[in-house]
Amino acid sequence: MAEDALFAGPAVRRLRKREGLTQAAASARLDISPSYLNLIERNQRPVSARVMMQLVEQFDFDPRSLREDEAIGGMDGLVRRFADERFADLGIDREELQEFLASSPQVAAAFARLYDNAAPAARGSEDPLTASRREIERWRNHFADLDAAAEDLADDMRLSRGDIGLALVERLRERHQLSVRILPREIMPDSLRRLDLHARQIQLSEMLSISSRNFQLALQIAQLEFADAIDAVAKGAKFDDEAARALFARHLTGYVAAALIMPYGRFLRACEATGYDLPVIERRFGVSFEQLAHRLTTLQRVGQRGLPFFMVRLDRAGQFSKTFTGASTARFVESDASCPLWHAHRAFDRAGELQVQFVALDESGERDGGWLTMARTVEGSGAPGEAQFVVAVGVEAVLAGDLAQARDISLRPADAQPIGPGCARCHRSGCRQRSLPPRGRKLAFDRIRRGVTPFEFEEG
């Protein structure tokens, strides 16, 4: 498969220069033509298995050195560092970073080392939640072994039938001798679920919706039957803070629960058959919009990939409480604030309505291509009327043409709504919605003319 091809031009070039060989001399030892070696070194041809064996035999080459980028967190680690507000005005996209990492991995590692060793105040400290999110995105929010195991269990439980909740209850009763009891709010005022081993009960709050009840039961099954597998993945992460590991393990438990209720193969077939029609899929699997949004970011199974969606959850203050970019290239959701021009904010005043919008990070939509986004209000689990958020999902516009929600939306680049990564990191001039000046830009003042925007600044 094309995505399995190994491009290692810089590593091969460094090895040849270390040995003091010309391309002609090195190609002779590798039993390939000089022109072919030239293409390999320029990353225009992959390193075949035969050439790799020759590198090992002729130069005592260690193939593990090709994984040097793991030390900086790979592509996602580089994206995270370049998301720093000090680089916001440069418009560096993921494709440029991929080329940088592929062509100059040592230079990329040097940049990462300088960045990581900078003063904490300059780069920002990493709290447990940020560390956990970083690890999730390192995996692109797809955990293949957990996904496959959950799908096997779903097949074993025959979760394709209509009443998923009944199947989950039966599994807990037959396999774990646990019954399910719904308790009044006054008995569980601050809890959604409680495991009472003395009474052999899983107690659920009556305030949970049906989809939330099912998810809580699936979470309990994940904790009981996937504990070792989840723990193995969590322990493999390099966290400095145990709280970050706990948050990561909690995410993995939710991942398994979602994979159990929405088994990968059946879920992807439903997405493709309906044109990713979100309301239809939500009903078909009996899930909430938020549960569906989570699952859409995980569809990266090798040989069976879905569209690369991102997902965020935000509150009325524009703060992101959840951010999952998966395999998406959406940079604007990696910020700590959202753009008020994004219709995700409008959803708060139109509860239950799906807000569909084509957005881009530059005025024309030509540079980044833009994203089709869909946003809707959701209520805090077990707290109807007390906590409200908006969940938004999005996919690159170039991939969105056949989606059900794109049928009445123009995806021409010129029709995209320009947005930014929050005012402090946005360097677009002339925005009348701007609330803060952009960091890193010198403000401009004119005593003769007063502009229509509150802050004017010198162009970079």
Image (cartoon, rainbow, N blue to C red):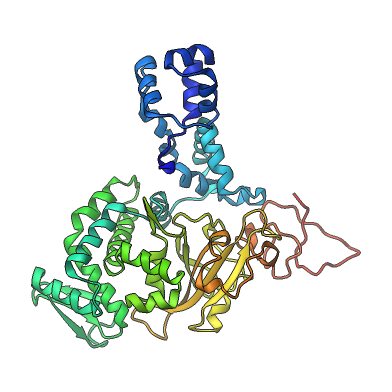
User: 119 or 230, which lies in front?
Assistant: 230
User: 415 or 421, which lies in front?
Assistant: 415
- In this orientation, does residue 243 appear? yes
Where in the figure is residue 342, as x and y percent of width and height? 60, 70
User: Which residue reaches farthest right?
Assistant: 448
Where in the figure is residue 329, as x and y percent of width and height? 53, 54
Where in the figure is residue 376, as x and y percent of width and height? 49, 77
Q: Which residue lies at the image location 43% right of the left edge and 16% below the top edge?
A: 31
> Within the image, what quadrant is residue 4 found in?
top left
- In this orientation, does residue 21 appear? no
* Above or below: residue 95 compared with residue 189: above
Q: In the rendered view of the protein, which quadrant contains the N terminus? A: top left
Q: Which residue lies at the image location 40% right of the left edge and 34% below the top edge?
A: 67
> Within the image, what quadrant is residue 428 found in?
bottom right
Give left or right: position of 167 versus 185. left
User: 29 or 150, which lies in front?
Assistant: 29
Where in the figure is residue 433, as x and y percent of width and height? 69, 70
